[in-house]
Amino acid sequence: MRSTPGLTNTRVMALAIDPVAPVILYAGTDGGGVFRSMDGGGNWSEINAALTNTTVHVLAMTRPAPATLYAGTNGGVFVIQLGAKALPAADPARP
């Protein structure tokens, strides 16, 4: 896999595409947490605020709320709120 700027962990285990803006991608990695690309994968930034487990096996976004990303990790499921202006915050999801 070719490394792109900002993607410090290239062992990607899960990928999600924003259903409203398909140029926005999310990558869940093995030990590096969740990364977001706003330009179709050219550049990446880490979005792990409060994510207590960084081994991500699955990512999901639901409609009609594309501003919410779910990350399934070894430590459970986390909900990452993706605000336009604020950094995302992750909290353990409750069943």
Image: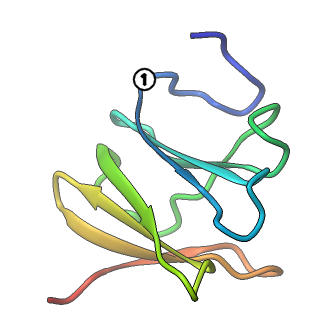
Q: In x, y percent, where is residue 52?
A: 32, 62
Q: Is residue 57 visible?
A: yes
Looking at the image, is 3 positioned above or below residue 50?
A: above
Q: In x, y percent, where is residue 3?
A: 67, 16
Classify the position of the C terminus by image quarter: bottom left
Q: How is the image coloured?
A: rainbow
Looking at the image, is 39 positioned above or below residue 61?
A: above
Q: Is residue 52 visible?
A: no
Q: Residue at x 32, y 51 (%)?
A: 58
Dot 1: within a 10 Å radius of its alpha carbon, few (fewer than 14), some, or many (20 or more) residues?
some
> Looking at the image, which residue sits at the far top?
1
Relative to residue 81, is residue 40 drawn left or right? Answer: right
Residue type (three-letter) at the residue carrying disc 1 = Arg
Q: Residue at x 64, y 31 (%)?
A: 7
Q: Residue at x 80, y 35 (%)?
A: 43
Q: Secondary structure at mark 1?
A: loop
Relative to residue 77, is residue 6 drawn left or right? Answer: right
Q: How many marks?
A: 1
Q: Residue at x 27, y 59 (%)?
A: 72
Residue closer to the observer: 40 or 43: 40
Dot 1 corresponds to which residue? Answer: 11
Q: In x, y percent, where is residue 12?
A: 44, 30
Q: In x, y percent, where is residue 40?
A: 78, 40
Relative to residue 82, is residue 77 drawn left or right? Answer: left
Classify the position of the N terminus by image quarter: top right
In which quarter of the view is residue 63 placed?
bottom right
In which quarter of the view is residue 70 placed?
bottom left
Looking at the image, is 93 positioned above or below residue 16?
A: below
